[in-house]
Image (cartoon, helix red, strand yellow):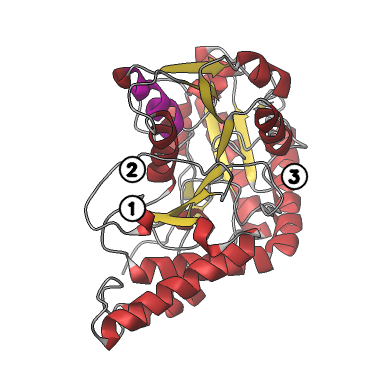
Amino acid sequence: MNPRQPIYLDHQATTPVDPRVLEAMLPYYEGDFGNASSSTHAFGWRAEAAVDDARERIAACLGLDAKEIVFTSGATESNNLAIHGVLNAKPGQARSVVTTEIEHPSVLEAAGAQRAFGHRDIVVGVRPDGLVDPDAIVAAIEEDTSLVSVSAANSEIGTLPDIEEIAQRCKERGVLFHSDAAQAVGKLPLSLGSSAIDLLSFSAHKIYGPKGIGVLVVRKRRPRIKLRPLQFGGGQEGGLRSGTLAVPLIVGCARALELAVAEQEAETKRLRDLREKLRLEIEQAVPDVVVNGDLERRLPGNLNLSFPGLDGERLLLDLQGIAVSSGSACSSGSTEPSHVLLALGRDEALARSTVRFGLGRGTTEADIETAVEAVSRAVQNQKSR
């Protein structure tokens, strides 16, 4: 018999596949297994039709044209394609990209990697509450800046910058704007039809879809947004992302997004209420706990807490039966303190004492009560040693 599964409170890292999503995907692993690029028989035609239908449905959820949807392996690849693609669209021209200190590693490292191609990355600080000042972004734009990249929702502290204002001000300066929206799509109201956002990334596995599939939104603009691909071969996705299309994953991505958008309003209220219960009860049990990030402009299911004087790693181990993390899953194996918390002005000791709680579709009030008890017990145990 398997031991009892821990309570899962790490939904910013990933989410389980919704059974309704899995049901939509299964036919494309079985009878409809064709290659969407096979144009000479019914297997390929059905696969192509499934991809076209999924593209239309994703576009409809976001207020876009289907031609603006480019399928990738996930937000990390989408972020890299956006940054590398824009800066290297015209080889031989040195350019710069502006981003912030609290971006996901796939943005910060992709921007830093552009130095090898002769480009520059300009990294802007943020306010102590984790919000981005639009004036600071605009002030960082230089004559050779071709792209600004700011996340729609931070993956560690859940803060929500005003990306529409930033995008509009970039547009006024003639600079393209990209947003890593892996934590925002499906969780926040997002209609891109009249938006000034030029490029946007997200992953299906953050919204109860499968891992290994994501989207880069490339808006239809005049002049056309030009991107240099990361990989070459079969010319799929308009030549921007060659490779055999993962039909089951694409179908799952579309279904996951439809469900997330349909249930978003009710789920937002439910998660916010649960998060506030968790926060208030932990603050009552541990009076010196520190909340990281603004509480108003924040993802409804995110709570990032630091416990002064405690060892975060040991605290995570002591939270038996509760699956939580110290920060971004893409850097959780690092021994370094969170770059996001350091950017907020937290010292290393406080940054190392941090736990991120990510509430999601399966989280119940009973889970919150169990988590509060576990945190209180773990803190008391560590303080008494």
Of residues 231 and 356, the one nearer the viewer is: 231
- Marks 2/1 in contact by CB < 8 Å: the verdict is yes
Q: Three-letter amino acid code at disc 2? A: Pro
Establish if 29 lies above or below 314: below
- Residue at image point 68% right, 30% down: 286
Identify the residue under disc 2.
229
Identify the residue under disc 1.
239
Observer-side mark, 3 or 1, equals 1
Establish if 139 lies above or below 316: above
Of residues 155 and 364, the one nearer the viewer is: 155
- Residue at image point 38% right, 56% down: 238
Q: Is residue 374 visible?
A: no
Between the residue at mark 3 and the residue at mark 1, the CA separation in whole angstroms equals 46 Å
Query: What span is in magenta?
Result: 106-115
Q: Three-letter amino acid code at disc 1? A: Gly
Within-10-Å neighbours for mark 1: few <14, some 14–19, many 20+: some
Of residues 363 and 25, the one nearer the viewer is: 25
Residue 274 lies, in percent from the top left, at: 71, 52
**Horizontal placement of 35 versus 317: left or right?**
left
SS for tag 2? loop
Residue 76 lies, in percent from the top left, at: 40, 42
- Residue at image point 69% right, 61% down: 264
Residue 186 lies, in percent from the top left, at: 61, 57
Identify the residue under disc 3.
276
Q: Three-letter amino acid code at disc 3? A: Glu
Q: Does the magenta stretch include residue 107?
A: yes
Within-10-Å neighbours for mark 2: few <14, some 14–19, many 20+: some
Residue 167 lies, in percent from the top left, at: 66, 35
